[in-house]
Image (cartoon, rainbow, N blue to C red):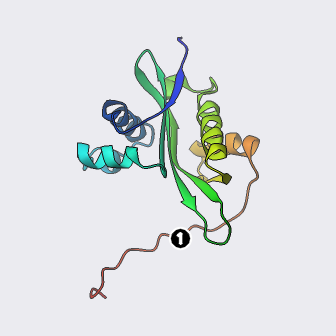
């Protein structure tokens, strides 16, 4: 096993971003979300160029073996930001080596530099999610919340 390197992706890192999308597709077994309608290069370059989108990858020998996608949310009630981890995954063959923790630690450093206040993440509660819940429990404080998906309704459509 080689040594992994964690880095933040920028607008020029399209190959690594595609590697991250492929990793998410595989780990989450969700090709419909991550492969079926991938954004074009212009969209991904613009997204990766935004300060408020953070894509981190853990690479080993040039291969993406772990990654994290997060968003910086500027708050309105105080001059501070929260960071939301949207997706975090590590290839099955590379788990239990500290990669997920290293990705979160890098996000903590980025958040601190940007005046962040807290990082939050949601976790599913299935048996297959126990390792993620254990990781998040070690690094943070668990809150019991409900999550609701509210569909987008375009004006004039119901």
- Relative depth, front residue between 92 and 37: 37
Q: Which residue is drawn at 53% across and 70% down?
A: 148
Q: Position of residue 32 (x, y in %)?
A: 31, 50
**Relative to residue 13, is residue 113 depicted above or below?**
below
In this orientation, does residue 124 appear?
no
Quarter of the image where the C terminus is located: bottom left
Horizontal side of 23 relative to 84 (left or right) equals left
- Relative depth, front residue between 32 and 139: 139
Q: Which residue is drawn at 73% across and 60% down?
A: 143
Q: Which residue is drawn at 62% across and 30% down?
A: 102
Horizontal side of 140 relative to 37 (left or right) equals right
Judged from this view, the residue extending furthest toward the top is: 1
- Relative depth, front residue between 39 and 52: 52
Mark 1 = which residue? 148
In this orientation, does residue 64 appear?
yes
Q: Position of residue 52 (x, y in %)?
A: 49, 52
- For disc 1, the neighbor class at 10 Å (few under 14, some 14 to 19, many from 20) is few
Circle count: 1
Q: Position of residue 68 (x, y in %)?
A: 51, 40
Residue 150, by quadrant, is bottom left
Q: Residue at x 65, y 38 (%)?
A: 109
Q: Where is residue 41 in the image (x, y as percent from the top left)?
A: 24, 42
């Amino acid at each position: 096993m080689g040594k992994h390197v964690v880095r933040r992706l920028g607008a020029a890192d399209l190959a690594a971003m595609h590697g991250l999308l492929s990793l998410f597709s595989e780990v989450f077994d969700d090709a419909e979300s991550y492969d079926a309608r991938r954004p074009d290069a212009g969209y991904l370059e613009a997204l990766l160029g935004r300060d408020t989108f953070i894509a981190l990858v853990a690479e080993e020998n040039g291969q993406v073996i772990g990654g994290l996608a997060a968003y910086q949310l500027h708050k309105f009630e105080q001059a501070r930001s929260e960071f939301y981890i949207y997706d975090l995954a590590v290839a099955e063959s590379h788990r239990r080596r500290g990669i997920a923790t290293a990705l979160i630690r890098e996000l903590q450093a980025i958040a601190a530099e940007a005046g962040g206040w807290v990082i939050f993440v949601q976790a599913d509660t299935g048996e297959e999610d126990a390792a993620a819940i254990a990781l998040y429990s070690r690094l943070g404080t668990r809150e019991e919340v409900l999550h609701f998906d509210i569909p987008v309704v375009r004006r004039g459509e119901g």
